[in-house]
Amino acid sequence: ATPLTRHFLSQAFLKDLNPENPLGTSGKLAQAYDRVLREIYMGSSSAVSPAALKIAIARFAPRFAGCSQHDATEFLAYLLDGLHEDLNRIRKAPYVELPDIEDGENMAVASAEAWDGHLQRNNSLVLQTFYGQFKSTCVCPRCNRVSVSFDAFNHVSLEIPQPQSNRFMSILLFASNNTNALPTRCVLQVPRGSSVADLKQLLSKQSGIPIQRLAFCDIYEYSIYEILQDNKSVNTIRSNDLIAAYEVDPYTNTTIHVVATNTLKNTVKESNSNDEEGKNKDDELFGFPIVTSFRATITCTEVYQHLWTKFNYIQGLQKEWMQVCITNNNGEPHNLFPNNSPMLPSDSEDNIVDYLGENCTEQFLFCAVQWNIPSSKAADTIKTNFIQVSDHPSYLKATKQEAYNINNRITLDQCFQTFTRPERLDDNNMWYCNKCKEHVRALKTMELWRLPNILVVQLKRFEFHTRKLDTFVDFPLEGLDMSHYCGSSTSDSFVQHNNSNDDALYDLFAVTNHFGRAGFGHYTAFARCWDETPDKGEWTLFDDASAVAVEHVVTPAAYILFYRRRRFH
C-alpha cells in the first residue's frame, strides 16, 4: 500500500517508533519491515528474500515460525496490528471506559464517541489507512433489550453463501484394519449445530467401524492439537482445522493408547546448522501424526513393530530409518530405558509396562518417531508420500457439488448481504444480557459503520476444513460501492462531496490467491501500480520469484481482496 510504503521509505516512520509500547515488538517489526522495503525499492537484486521480516515476526508470534503454511489473513492481521503498535504515536494510553449504547440513542454521536475513545489510545498511519469501524447490534430474545457496540477492524471476513442448509465436514480416516491403505478423505454432511458424536455416528455407518473405536482429533502443525469430545459442537471447529478420525481400541485398563508425531532427522545436513529461532534444523515435524493402541502386555520389540505397521502405506520408507523416542506431552524426551535413554529399544523382549509403570493405561503415551533419512532427495520424497491420501466416494460426490457451486457464481455483493444479515447466536457464543442477568442466544447484526481508506476483504473459503470452497466469487475491479453496506451512509455523519458517493467507492489494487486445500497449498498475488487517480494500470501476477503481466484477475482462487478508496480521508 503506497501510503504506508512512502511513510517508511521517507523514514518518516522513525519519529513514530514507539519501542516502549508493551503491546508492540519494541520497534523490531517496523524496522524489519523497513529493511525489506528498502531492499525492494532501493536494492540492486532482481529478487528479495524477506527472511529478516519472517524472523522478526516469528520472534513475537511463534505460530508463524517454521516452514509450515499459515493462513494469509491471520498473518496480515498480525502484521498490520504489529506495525500499528510499533508506530503508535500515543506514548501513554489513558484508560477509556465506553458506556453501553442502548436502542434509541443517536448512533452518529455514539459511534463518534467510540471512535474518539479508540483514538485516545491508538494513533498511527496504519490505523488511518487500514482501520474502520464495525457496528454490532444484539437483541435479547427474552426481554427484547437492544445493545449496540462499535469496534475497530482492519479487515472484513465474508462468508461465501452456500445453497445447502447442512454443513459438509471433511474427515481424514485412519483405519487399522488395512495398514497398507492410504488414509481416506471422507466427507460427512451434517446439520449445522451438530456434535462430534453425530459425526462419529455417520462415519461409523459409512466406514463400518464401531463408534466406540473412533477417536476424533484436531491436527495442527503436524501434531495432535486436541482430542475432540463427543459433546463438542461442529460450529466450534475452526475453518482451518484438519480433523482426523483414528480407529483405536476402546479405553480399558489393559490397553495403552499412543499419540505419535513424525520427526525428520536428515543426516545430510550439517549438525551445527540452526534455523532462525536457534533450533536444530534436523528436528522437523512433518506428515500426519498417529493415534493408535495396543495391549499393555506386549514387549518393547512388539511396540516398535506395531508402530512400524502404521507406516506400511508410505512408499519408499525403510524400517532401519525409524527410531522411537518416548516423550512427555510437551515433546520433551522422557528417559525411561537403560542408560538413561528415551529411545525405545527395538530389540528388547522386556515388557513395555516394566518401563512405563503399572498406571500407564490411565494416560496417553507420547512419542516422537524419528526418521534418519540418508539423503535430502529421499527425505523430500518421503515427506510428500507421508501426506498422500485416497478419496472416498463421499469426497468425490462433494467435489461434484462444489463444481456445481463454481458454475453458479456468487457475487461479492451477495457475500456482503450475508455478512449484514441478522444471525441467531448458538449455544457456544451466547451474549450476556444485563437486564435478564444471564447469557442468551441473542439476534446479532453486523454492519460496517466507518469505512477505511484501504478495505481488506477476506473470502472465507475454508469452512469445509481439508476441502476448500472453490466457489467462483465475482468481484468488481473498479467502482465497488460500499454505501449499501455502511450503516452510517444513511446518517448525517456520512460525508458526501458534491452529492456523490465517492467516499464509498473503491477500486481494486491487489488480490491474494490460494491454490490447494487447507493446510497444504500455494499463495500467489495479483497487483497493479498505485496511482493517485483511480487505478487503470496493467495487472501483474506475482508467483514466488516470477512476475508476469496478466489480463484476468477474477478467479476461483481469490482469497483476499485489497480495495483503495477513491477519495482518501
Image (cartoon, grey):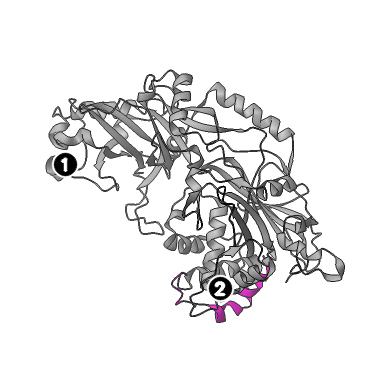
Q: Amino acid at mark 2?
A: Asn
- In front here: 80 or 539? 80
Farthest bottom residue?
A: 15
Q: Residue at x 51, y 57 (%)?
A: 435
Badge nearest the viewer, 2 or 1: 2
Q: Is residue 239 left or right of residue 328?
A: right
Give whichever of discs 2 and 1 has the lower sequence position.
2
Q: Are marks 2 and 1 in contact (CB under 8 Å)?
A: no
Residue 104: x and y in percent read 66, 63
Instruction: Find residue 336 and name its label.
Output: 1
- Distance from label 2 to label 1 (Cα)? 53 Å
**Residue 289 visible in this rendered orientation of the protein:** yes
Q: Is residue 222 left or right of residue 453?
A: left
Q: Quadrant of the N terminus?
A: bottom right
**Residue 126 visible in this rendered orientation of the protein:** no
Q: Secondary structure at mark 1?
A: loop
Residue 473: x and y in percent read 71, 43
Residue 539: quarter of image: bottom right
Instruction: Find residue 122 and name its label.
Output: 2
The number of callouts visible is 2
Q: Secondary structure at mark 2?
A: loop
- The reply to whether the magenta stretch includes residue 230 is no
- The reply to whether the magenta stretch includes residue 2 is yes
Q: Which residues are magenta?
A: 1-26
Q: Amino acid at mark 1?
A: Leu
Q: Is residue 363 left or right of residue 123?
A: left
Q: Residue at x 38, y 46 (%)?
A: 284
In this view, 526 is above or below 165: below
Crowd rating for badge 1 (residues with CA inside 10 Å; few <14, some 14–19, many 20+): some
Residue 342: quarter of image: top left
Residue 52: x and y in percent read 49, 64
